[in-house]
Image (cartoon, rainbow, N blue to C red):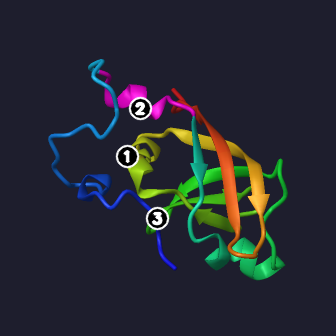
Amino acid sequence: MGSSGSGRISDYPGSSSSGNSGEGSGGGSQLDRCARAFNARLEDVERSGYYRTHGRVPPVGTQLTVVQNKRLVAQTVNGESVGNLPTSLNYLAACIKNGWTYVGTVQSAASPPPTASVSADFAAAPPSP
């Protein structure tokens, strides 16, 4: 069971792509993308540290933050990974590198069968001056 990203090479940093993959044609800047709130269905939940430790998904209302590991990961305030963000959100790595932070809340959570799933809403916080 692997990731369920878009499968587009343009999802990965350093790739060059002429398409905006649904980002709109308003001429928005990188800053605009960094400032957006978003919802994500997390990937690889059953392989996460939280699931392996507790044998279940975190309850609805659990606060999460986004951190950069090998992939972008949603984790609890205690540092337990809950799941990977989809590769379509890889642009957030550059935002985090520039000081943006993302805090969210689990909106839905289901344990197996058939698979564990977690969906969360995230809000952006700009870099400190």
Asked if residue 127 is positioned above or below residue 44 in the image, the reply reads: above
Under circle 1, the secondary element is: loop
Q: Position of residue 106 (x, y in %)?
A: 75, 50
Measured in 3D between alpha carbons, the distance from the residue under mark 2 to the one under mark 3, in whole angstroms, is 22 Å
Mark 2 / mark 3, whichever is N-terminal: 3
Tell me the amino acid under the disc marked 1.
Answer: Tyr
What residue is pinned by disc 2? 33
Q: How many marks?
A: 3
Describe residue 16's horizontal placement relative to residue 96 as left or right.
left
Crowd tier of the residue under label 3, counting other residues whose Cα lies within 10 Å: few below 14, some 14–19, many 20 or above: some
What residue is pinned by disc 1? 91
- Tell which of 63 and 106 is nearer to you: 106
Between marks 3 and 1 in the image, the one whose residue lies nearer the viewer: 3
Residue 35 in magenta? Answer: yes
Image quadrant assignment for residue 109: bottom right
Q: Report the magenta residues as a range.
A: 28-37
Crowd tier of the residue under label 1, counting other residues whose Cα lies within 10 Å: few below 14, some 14–19, many 20 or above: some
Asked if residue 36 is positioned above or below residue 49 in the image, the reply reads: above
What residue is pinned by disc 3? 4
Asked if residue 21 is positioned above or below residue 74 in the image, the reply reads: above
Is the C-beta separation of discs 1 and 2 under 8 Å?
Answer: yes
